[in-house]
Amino acid sequence: MAKKKIIVLTGSGISAESGILTFRDSGGLWEGYDVMEVATPEGWAKNQDLVLKFYNERRAKAAEAQPNAGHFALVELEKYFDVHIITQNVDDLHERAGSSHVLHLHGELSKVQSSLYPELIYEIGAKPIEMGSLCAKGAQLRPYIVWFGEAVPLMKDAAEIAQTADAFLVIGTSMVVYPAASLIDYVPTNALKYIIDPNPPTISKTGRYSNLTFIAEKGTIGVPQVAQELIAKLA
């Protein structure tokens, strides 16, 4: 018999427990930087040096961070279920923990992209991008990140994955960043749904959300708890 599908949407909360902070922790500043200066196409057009410096710092910090109990609990679920992770995070902690299927909605720090030919994407690991670092067609490389104001190319793929869920977990995200926050609307009505966050969003548990359970915990506590519950109910 085919394994049941567990679809997981993760946000900054699960990475924050590994020491990776986001701009939402400090009112529009991202570790001292104005997000409009470093995370928009306009910011890139205005000061490429600043944007590269910012993401080079983020890339180095992400490389030093380690997966936590929340990440590892999702890996454990793969023993029992077909698990697919849709993440808003740009770090690779899910992959380093051992998750097999990870879709990055907002890009990846460990990759770079041509600023003129977006189909040209390269692995860079933890190395910095410099001014003068060029793609194969001679254009400056930029971070492989979906900036504010840009389309989310993988949203259609994510919505299709969400539609297959037997259970849908939302971990460490405020559910206010669209289009990612709309993914729960694609989940089948009868699928089990969990939102794991110390400050769960206000959602009425009726209709499409009648199977919704709030777990008011950090990911390191709430995800292992939900994992055991899913194994007991669905495995």
Image (cartoon, rainbow, N blue to C red):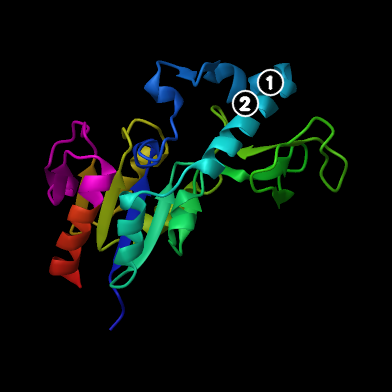
Instruction: Say what secondary structure mark 2 lies in.
Output: helix
Q: What's the residue at 77%, 43% (across, down)?
A: 117
Res. 150 mark: none
Residue 85 x, y percent position in the rendering: 40, 55
Residue linked to disc 2: 54
Q: Nearer the viewer, residue 68 or 185?
A: 68
Q: Which residues are magenta?
A: 197-223
Residue 39, relative to residue 220: is it above or below? above
Residue 170 x, y percent position in the rendering: 29, 46
Res. 50 mark: 1
Label 1 crowd (10 A; few <14 / some 14-19 / many >=20): some
Q: What's the residue at 56%, 45% (across, down)?
A: 153
Q: Nearer the viewer, residue 40 or 223?
A: 223
Q: Is residue 125 magenta?
A: no
Which quadrant of the figure contains the C terminus? bottom left
Q: Is residue 163 visible?
A: no
Q: Is residue 153 visible?
A: yes
Instruction: Say what secondary structure mark 1 lies in.
Output: helix
User: In the figure, is residue 214 to the left or right of 137?
Assistant: left
Label 2 crowd (10 A; few <14 / some 14-19 / many >=20): some
Residue 22, relative to residue 218: is it above or below? above
- Assess whether mark 2 and mark 1 are in contact (beta carbons under 8 angstroms): yes
Q: What's the residue at 25%, 40% (across, down)?
A: 218
Q: Amino acid at mark 2?
A: Phe
